[in-house]
Image (cartoon, helix red, strand yellow):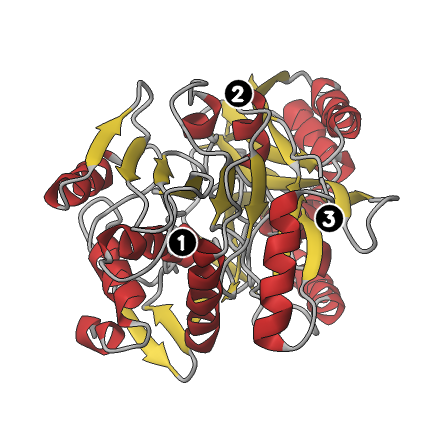
Amino acid sequence: MSQEIRNLEPKALWNKFVDLNAVPRPSKKEERVIEFMKNFGTSLGLETFEDEIRNVIIRKPATPGMENRKTIVLQGHLDMVHQKNNDTNFDFLTQGIDMYVDGDWVKAKGTTLGADNGLGVAAIMAILESKDIPHPAIDALFTIDEETGMTGALNLKGGVLKGEILLNLDTEEDDEIDIGCAGGVDVTATRSYNEEETPEGSVGYTITVKGLNGGHSGMDIHKGLGNANKIMNRLLFDGFENFGLQIAEISGGSLRNAIPRESVAKVIVAAMYDEAFVFDMQEVIGDIKAEFKTMEPNLTIEIVRSDLPSKVMDLGVQEGLLRSIYAAHNGVYRMSADMEDLVETSNNIARVIAKNGEISIQNLTRSSVESSKFDLANALRSAYELFGCEVEFGGSYPGWTPNPKSEIVDVLTSIYEKQNGDKPKVVACHAGLECGILGTNYPGMDMISFGPTIHGAHSPDERASISSSQKFWKFLLEILANIPEKK
């Protein structure tokens, strides 16, 4: 299948994407892709180095006649979100992505594709390798750990980069030019609990929520998609309220930046309620599926008799857990008053684990307004602290304040209109682009973000448009040829 991808146009872009996707590169485990990128740069005879946090920087001089143009930074992140379907046998630490073509889309078999941000990285690699593409002097910046903390961008020191203009290639709609983004903060609630012996006369059940679309916890948060942790909590709460259900363990969701698609809980009920419990649950399931029938047609909720667990959660803690997750906000919290249709603040209840006497609830709170971000984070903290959790805020990063009057915005808008016959959408996005962070140490740098159309990022349904990638490549080459002159 790799050869099928390599034959796509533009070949320079897709060949580099295939090369990159052969290298395992999950977030926080980027050692192999860092070495891959350093070897790539040195093989071209270009200045190549890594900084203290292990971002990779490759410098390429201007092509003849372009020496008087401003130096640019071409930027993308090396890591990718690792998500797979439960029935997919795949090891992200050892395997390259298995890709195929489906009409106008490149997809992966049961896993995330890595087009976020692999296509942007591949485009930069193709430019660095090229011998016939006009461009100014380039600082190619490949950051690490964008998806799970942005530590690469956060730890990039001032003075490392020489560029005056930064082109971030990490936007996922080809008719959009991004000039702003949301910041974020991880909200993590934890506590210990006592386990009790399973009461006699109990029966065990496994409840499974699966088949949800999932998606990007920023870009897709406004779509009304199902959150497996919220749906599971609703089921458990009903079973507890009506039949005294007790929880043995819960495992829901995975990564903070992915809307959770699946959750599994092991529970017990008294044998005397067995039939009534199942009947009631089927009614609740019917209601939930009816509510989500449009957005989540593949939602499946199963309740299956299973082995009786030996221990269950203390009832007082269980009640606090269920009520706190019910109270905790998930989804859009506030829309922007300044930009039409832009989500300002949101939360994703991403991961819920309760097992062996330990509870962990992991959230990602996003906002383009710092005060609103922490307003929601404090609301979550309050909900979790009320049932005895320790709550920590971590990995906070700033948003990127839009500058609609920047010089590079005018350049890209003009080129897009000439190439496509209409104006692009100049927008801010509800995702965590690295521009806002990079701007803290490079405050004078003019920044913009764009890219090819990618759907379903952060989920196994991730797919990249072939025709859009051709449009993006043409757009990028014209931008490079029209970078303003140094002042």
- Of mark 3 and mark 2, the one earlier in the sequence is 3
Q: Where residue 6 appears, x then y in whole percent?
A: 22, 72
Q: Is residue 465 above or below residue 387?
A: below
Q: Which residue bears the numbered disc 3?
A: 238
Give the amino acid at mark 2. Answer: Asn
Tell me if I can see residue 218 in this picture.
no
Mark 3 and mark 2 residues within 8 Å of each other at the beta carbon: no
Residue, x 37% and y 37% (percent of image)?
Answer: 141
Q: Quadrant of residue 56?
A: top left
Which element carries disc 3, helix, strand or loop? Answer: helix
Give the amino acid at mark 3. Answer: Asp
Q: Where residue 238 appears, x then y in whole percent?
A: 73, 48
Tell me if I can see residue 290 in this picture.
yes
- Of mark 3 and mark 1, the one earlier in the sequence is 1
Say few, some or many: other residues with alpha carbon within 10 Å of mark 1 (under 14 / 14 to 19 / 20 or more).
many
Q: Where residue 440 appears, x then y in whole percent?
A: 57, 22
> Toward the viewer: 272 or 211?
211
Which element carries disc 1, helix, strand or loop? Answer: helix
Mark 3 vs mark 2: give the one in front: 2
Q: Is residue 460 above or below residue 382?
A: below
Q: Is residue 238 above or below residue 401?
A: below
Mark 3 vs mark 1: give the one in front: 1
Q: Which residue bears the numbered disc 2?
A: 441
Q: Where residue 367 appears, x then y in whole percent?
A: 71, 36
Mark 2 vs mark 1: give the one in front: 2
Horizontal placement of 32 versus 226: left or right? left
**Image quarter hosting the C terminus:** top right
Q: Which residue bears the numbered disc 1?
A: 120
Give the amino acid at mark 1. Answer: Gly
Residue, x 71% and y 40% (percent of image)?
Answer: 402
